[in-house]
Structure formats: C-alpha cells, structure tokens
Image (cartoon, rainbow, N blue to C red):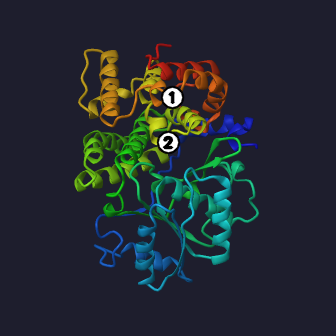
Amino acid sequence: MTYWFTQPQLKALVPLAGASAIRGLSTPFSVPKIFMGANALSEAGGLGASVVDSLAAMCVKKQAFIVSDEHVGRYATRVASVLEGHQFTTRIWGRAEPEAPLENVRDCAEAMKQFEPDAIVAVGGGSVIDTAKAAWILYERPDITDLAMVSPILPLGLRQKAVLVAVPTTSGTGSDCTAISVVTDTQARRKIPIVSAELMPDFSVLVPAFVTGMPPKLTAGTGLDALTHAVDCVMSPMTNDFTDALALRAIQMVFKYLPRAYRDGTDLEARIRMHMAASMAGIAFGNGGVGLTHSLGHSLGKTFAVHHGVAVGIFIPYALQFYSPITDKYLDICTALEVKGKSTGKSLAGLIEKVRTLLAELDVPLSLEGLGISREDFEKNIDKLTLHGSEDPSVFQSPRPVTMEQCQRLFRCAYEGKDVDF
Ligand SMILES: [Fe+2]
C-alpha cells in the first residue's frame, strides 16, 4: 500500500508548511465548540443554546448516526435518547473496533450511506472517534477509495451531507478536539494518520459521568497519551503561545490528577480534570503537533500490540533527551512543574526523573524490555521498527530531525532503559 506521508514531495512540503517561520505569517488555530460538565448533554443547557439545540439548528433532516463500540453501548443509548427527545431519528452502529482498522471503517461508511444522516455522533474512545471521522470522509466523498492517500493538502469538501459531534468516553486521545484520524492498515500492521483541517469535529461534549467507569489500566494508558501530546507539543517547532498555554496547563493537570484517577476511579474531581486536560492537550497538539514519541510509539504499538498511550508515554524521557542538544524549551515544562536545577542539564534530569516517577506510580515500565518484549523478538523486528518509526509523519514535527541510524539507536536505548547521549 502507498501512503501519503511517504511521497517525496509531501515529505518535503509538510515540514516546511509547519515550520514556525512560515506558520507565523498566517497561523490558524482550530477548536470545536465545546460543551462540558455534568449537564453538558442534558436539555437544561446553561447560558445560551444546549449542544442538542445547537446541533438541531444545523440539521434539517435530523437523522443522527451514532458510532460506538461494544464497551460503551450504554452511553450511546443515552445519547440517542437525548437526541430522540429533540425530534432526531437515530441509528446506533456499535461495531467500531480498536485501532480503527480500514476494513472496519469501510463497514461503518457503508452503514452510514444507507442511513444518510445529517449528524454523525461518535460516542467512545479515540478509536471510535477516529473511525467516525474516517467513515465520514468516505460517506461525503464516495469517489475517495484510498484513505491512505488523503493528505493534509487535499481539499475534502466535508459537511455537504453531515456535521460531526464527538462525545469521548476516555480521557486521553484528544480526538474530540483534533483534525486527525489515525486508522490502521492491518495487513501491513501500520498506523495511517489522516490529517485534514476539515476533520475537526463541530462539537466536543465532555460528560464526566461517561469516564468514571474506566478501569485503572485504561485510565493510566489514556492519561499518559494526554501527557505525551502536551509534552511533545511544547517541544514542537510548530508550537505558539496559544498551544503552549493549553499544553503546559494540561501537563500540570495530568501530574496532579492522573495518579488520583488511577488509584481511585470514583474521584470525580480527578476524573473531570483529566477529561478536560485530555481535550486541552488535544487542542494543543492538534494545532502544534506531536513528535518522536508518536512516531516511535506508533511503530512500537503496531509491531508489539502495546496500548497507544503506554507505547508513546514510555518514550517521553528518551525524546526529551534527544531533543535537548538543540532546544531548551523543556525548561518551560520544568517551570510549570516547579522542577528546579542549577543548570539546564540538571533541570532536564529533574524533569525526566519526575516523568519516570509518574510512570512508576501508574505501574508502567520505563523500558521496552520491561513491557515483556523479548530480546529475540526485538532484534527480529528492529529494522521494521526503525523504518516505520522514521517514516511516520509525526517526525515532521520533531524539533530535531532524526536519521534512520539515530532512530534505531533511540529504540535500542528505550529497550534497555539507557539514557540518550547522542
Ligand atoms: Fe496519542
């Protein structure tokens, strides 16, 4: 299969378009309309129209297609009943699969075409929202048959048929607030990020009651994903003061509330704060980018079936060390977390120690070996890991370009838990 991000012209163009000097001339900042809080989905609303009123005003047919999965059907049913109370006809498609495999996305799009909705409502974690986004492209543009070639510069012309609402049931992916859908080419065991400004949901609805049931392991993994988005965004060359403000605040919130939510899932304050932090980090990285944690993590995750949040979170210390010879932007994170050092090197060491302490609190290992990957399996897959890690489009936003050789050395450091000193 051919991918948009391996095309030589786009590999040259996208990093250039994302460079701060170019973006500074005209930098867009995109967000959905966000409704959050215990009443976010209710008819009561607050000041101004409720999310359902706002949605109804945009939908003439009032046909809502709800994308969900087998784990969160109860939340999809609740969303359907609220919509039906506002004269919507609904259909729940509850067959979204983890990691949004392309075949599953096509199934979803087929069901969408039969129902002909003017509202698509994704109720679920990142894979559900990403499935809805990718299927939405196929629904609106039946002429597009190859999602792997949908590049950031291809105009899609979405919203001729439907608008998109995202109701996340995990706190981490940020997909409710990004213009990105990550789907999976199952045959190649490879992630395909689809990036288009048009994929930004029209509404994000943050309902705390929808995340209180997350088990501890999922809470840790998704929470780490949010932290990784925020840390990488601060370090990205595409960052700006808007994204920094959100990312740095999200980092503070994750350090404060993720261990609490992990230890006690009924801690409502921690749940609410983590839910908001995930969307804040989503807005930040959706506008400012993520870097090596995600290129290496995507490669690792697909090769060894590691949860996305863990696969990217484990690389935070290694990526920060790799970036450090050419940028001291990590000092902003040190300031946000009150990590002090007598030199920049000591501050970085203190920050990395703080990240490692958080990983340990969440029972996440500090090395790939600690994930249970045998040396033999690692060596057997190192060339594939390196190729996919260095080709992933997230490398476009790395503050320090990475060669194939460096990419392999990064994987080797992460496998053994060694500091990156090159
Ligand atoms: Fe992520």
Q: Which of marks 1 and 2 is in front?
A: 2
For residue 363, above or below residue 404: below
Nearest the viewer among 408 and 397 is 408
Query: What's the residue type where badge 2 is placed?
Result: His
Q: Do the residues labelled 1 and 2 touch (CB within 8 Å)?
A: no
Image position, residue 280 (x, y; %):
38, 50
Query: What's the residue type where badge 1 is placed?
Result: Pro
For residue 9, above or below residue 46: above
Q: Is residue 222 visible?
A: yes
Find residue 399 and name its label.
1
Nearest the viewer among 202 and 67 is 67
Q: Is mark 2 within 8 Å of ligand 1?
A: yes
Residue under numbered circle 2: 308
**How many other residues sit within 10 Å of disc 1, few (<14), some (14-19) or many (≥20)?**
many
* Rendering quarter of residue 272: bottom left
Image position, residue 412 (x, y; %):
54, 19
Q: What residue is at 67 percent from the left and 48 percent from the top? A: 151
Q: What residue is at 64 percent from the left and 27 percent from the top? A: 381
Find residue 190 and name its label.
none
The answer to whether residue 376 is left or right of residue 280 is: right
Q: Can residue 155 be seen in this view?
A: no
Describe the element under mark 1 as helix, strand or loop: loop
Image position, residue 39 (x, y; %):
29, 70
Q: What residue is at 25 percent from the left and 15 percent from the top? A: 342
**How many other residues sit within 10 Å of disc 2, few (<14), some (14-19) or many (≥20)?**
many
* Rendering quarter of residue 334: top left
